[in-house]
Image: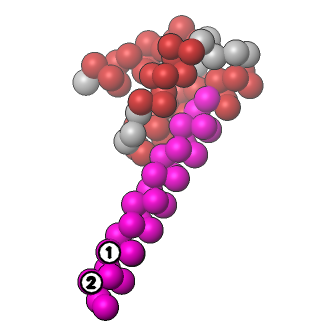
Amino acid sequence: MEIVTSWMEAGLERGRQEGLVQNAREDVLDVLEARFGEVPSALREQVVAVADPAELKRLHRQAVLAPDLHAFQQALSVSQAG
């Protein structure tokens, strides 16, 4: 019974983490849309491809501070190159 409980807990934790990452992606895209209007699909796909919560937090801050979409895209490209 402990194995099943452990397996279920691991699955729930994984689901929570995936949910947090998905919410962070949506937050980044929401800020970009609110500030700059429609986000090009290529840029949207790049944001959706990011899976690291710390990187998404950094991108959220960039979305708030970037003067335009081009500057945000440059910050995103730098993070993907590294």
Q: Which residue is mark 1?
A: 7
Task: Give the main secondary structure of the magenta stretch.
Answer: helix
Q: Residues within 10 Å of mark 1 (few under 14, many from 20)?
A: few
Q: Position of residue 81 (x, y in %)?
A: 28, 19
Q: Quadrant of the C terminus?
A: top left
Mark 1 secondary-structure assignment: helix
- Amino acid bearing label 1: Trp
Would you place residue 46 above or below residue 48 in this image? above
Task: Name which residue lies at 64% across and 24% down.
Answer: 32
Residue 26 counted in the magenta span:
yes
- For badge 2, the amino acid type reads Ile
What residue appears at the point 48 percent right and 27 percent down from the top-left corner? 47
**Which residue is at a point 39% across and 66% down the rendered structure image?**
11
Q: Left of 43 or right of it: where is 27?
A: right
Tell me the number on the disc at residue 3: 2
Label 1 with label 2: CB-CB less than 8 Å? yes
The reply, left or right, for residue 45 in relation to residue 8 is right
Quadrant hosting residue 80? top left
How many circles with numbers are drawn on the protein? 2
Element class at badge 2: helix
Residue 15 among those drawn in magenta: yes
Q: Which residues are magenta?
A: 1-29
**Residue 53: image tag:** none
Q: Which of the pair 32/71 is nearer the observer?
A: 32
Nearest the viewer among 44 and 24 is 44
Q: Residue furthest top?
A: 70
The x, y position of residue 40, in whole percent, is 59, 12
- The image quarter containing residue 65 is top right
Up/down of 42 relative to 59, above or below: above
Residue 71 rendering spot, x and y as whole percentages? 52, 12
- Decide if residue 64 is in sight here: no
